[in-house]
Amino acid sequence: MNFQTNRPPKEAYASAEWMERERTTLFAHAWTFVGVTNDFMKAGDYRTVRSGSASVMALMGKDGELHAFHNICRHRGAELLDNESGNTGGSLVCPYHRWTYGLDGNLRGLPNKAECFPDLDRAAFGLKPARIGRFNDLVFVNPDPEADFDGWIAPLAGKAWPHDLFASDVKEAVPLVYDLKCDWKVFIENAIDGYHLAYLHENTLGGPLPGQNLWERAGDHLIWYATEDGIRLSVIRVFETDGGLS
């Protein structure tokens, strides 16, 4: 691994203008893991995730296909789904004014249309589309409906993974959520630094030593996993090399 002395300027960690630029140029076009295919077994099954400033949903439609939409009502921008996962039933109903959308994202109806919106074209006010991507059983979403998932994931497709991530008995265990009061880059820079594990975490993780960290560049991604005594551990992280966690 090459040692680099160049670092972003301090504005990259403290400037509101810099953060806004990241939201519009990076996160607005970022692929974010949202779940696995077993999370979407029935029509109406959904999961939501935040990608930058956008709230995005992945949703199983009545057609048996996964769809992705921005999780906002087209009327006043209220979030349609408050929970991280669940089932919508046969439709999505905005809690603010009860505008109702089908699982295909089309606007099906709204209260008092004749009195309040007599000229509204329902066909023009469907949910804003996002982009869905699938890598074996892993499901990703992107706020940008024109995003290219195949091109983004292609460098990982032929890699030998240390475990079969897609075995039938693999499932989500206990989710871990960290509320970190720092710029996201501070966390990423630490998370991809395997050099410190055996020293700072000597009495907790107890390693692995630098020689037991394996780093592999795969296009715009960085794959990291650790080995001890020749046995590959279950800690696997994939990062985009521009710093965005994938």
Image: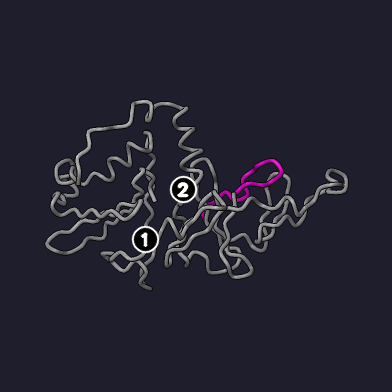
Asked if one can make out residue 86 in the rendered structure from this viewpoint, the answer is no
Spot occupied by residue 15 in the image (x, y as percentages of width and height): 42, 26
Q: Is residue 19 left or right of residue 239?
A: right
Secondary structure state at the residue bearing disc 1: loop
User: In x, y percent, where is residue 165?
Assistant: 34, 66
The secondary element bearing badge 2 is classed as loop
- The quarter holding residue 101 reads bottom right
Would you say residue 28 is visible in this rendering?
yes
Q: In the depicted view, which residue is nearer to us: 51 or 89?
A: 51
Q: Which residue is mark 2?
A: 30
Q: Is residue 165 above or below residue 141?
A: below
Binning the other alpha carbons within 10 Å of mark 2 as few (below 14), some (14 to 19) or many (20 upward) gives many
Please give the range of residues in magenta.
71-85
Of 217 and 225, nearer the camera is: 217
The structure residue drawn at horizontal position 49% and vertical position 60%, both measured from the top left corner, is 133
- Magenta residues: mostly which secondary structure? loop
In this rendering, the label closer to the viewer, 2 or 1: 2
Task: Name the residue that disc number 1 marks.
Answer: 173
Precedes in sequence: disc 2 or disc 1: 2
Where does the image place residue 27, in percent across and percent down from the top left?
Answer: 47, 43
- Mark on residue 34? none
Q: Point out the residue furthest to the bottom here.
A: 168
User: Left or right: where does residue 92 sit relative to residue 236?
Assistant: right
Q: Residues within 10 Å of mark 1 (few under 14, many from 20)?
A: few
Q: Residue at x 41, y 58 (%)?
A: 153
Judged left or right of residue 124, residue 147 is left
Image point (83%, 45%), residue name: 117
Q: Amino acid at mark 1?
A: Ala
User: Label 2 vs label 1: CA separation?
Assistant: 25 Å
Percent across and percent down for residue 43 are 60, 67
Q: Is residue 140 inside the magenta stretch?
A: no
Q: What amino acid type is highlighted by mark number 2? A: Ala
